[in-house]
Amino acid sequence: MDFSLFLLCLIQGITEAFPVSSSGHLAFLTLFLKVDPTLFDTALHAGTLLAFMTSFPGQVQQLFIGGYDIMCGKIHTLPAQKWIFLALATTPAILIGALLHIFHLRSASLFWMGFNSIIFGFFMGWADRYPGIFHPGTLGSGTHGSQRWWHSLVLGVGQVFAFFPGASRMGTCLTAARCLGYSRPKAFEASFLMGIACISSALVLKVKDIAAIGWKNFILTTLLSFVICFPLVKGVIAFSKKYSLIPFVLYRLGLGILILWALYKGWF
């Protein structure tokens, strides 16, 4: 594994756990690296998916139990209700992502990455500063107990905006969750759980890409991405219990301005 591939794993592991757009950073790195990030996209996301799942073993177990309950016709159990809620929240993004993949419609323009980093970063900061605009009654609960089924629609629509280059899947999910009044830790938790479903679905479409890099590179890249991302998942939730999202907002604004300025100056 050369330095370029190590750097890809480092950036993926960090940015997938933070609301700063992993795809935007990886695309930006293509200007400097000797490897094409798209070739390793499956392995990079497999590592972060593994990090998400091992960070929430209890929640993942409940989802598996819920899926089993539904197959047995027990749709009113708590695990089944959680499974249905998550399925409803992730279905819009899964469907749109599949269409974009099939028809090759997704763009990765640096201009839009910079622009969207600023715009969606601003909205994330606004939602964090004024939470509960969609459902004030959820404020202060700190749990998912105040969820309503229409919450899944709001979260699902929020995640769809992640297909805008530079918007950040984590960032758009956090924005939607904070608008619903979720506490910051629970907003992060919901975003990670939604990420498990979306990334799993995306990997199914890209599993054939493993052959392009070989099993050895796939395993090494997956493991390194996992090792980097895993501690950051718990770390960012611990951070959110004490601090606001402002550091991430400021980073996104600075990154967006830097990209747009570099493009204006003709550096790329």
Image (tube, grey):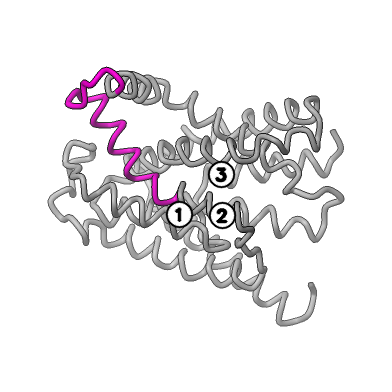
Residue toward you, 172 or 207: 207
Q: Is residue 78 magenta?
A: yes
- Count residues near mark 1 (Cα–Cα under 10 Å), then give few for <14, some for 14-19, many for 20+: many
Residue at image point 49% right, 35% down: 233
**Residue 72: x percent and y percent?**
27, 17
Query: To which residue does mark 2 refer?
Result: 21
User: Is residue 10 in sight in this rendering?
Assistant: yes
How far across and how far down the image is residue 203, in percent?
Answer: 59, 37
Distance from Cα at disc 3 to Cα at disc 2: 7 Å
Pointer 3 and pointer 2: residues touching (CB < 8 Å)? no
Residue at mark 3: 16
Where residue 47 sits in the image (x, y, percent)? 62, 32
Can you say whether 141 is above or below 137 in the image?
above
Residue at disc 2, secondary structure: loop
* Classed neighbour count for the residue bearing mark 3: other residues with Cα under 10 Å, few (<14), some (14–19), many (≥20): many
* Quadrant housing the C terminus: bottom right
Label 1 – label 2 distance at C-alpha = 8 Å
Report the magenta stretch's main SS.
Answer: helix
Image quarter hosting the N terminus: top right
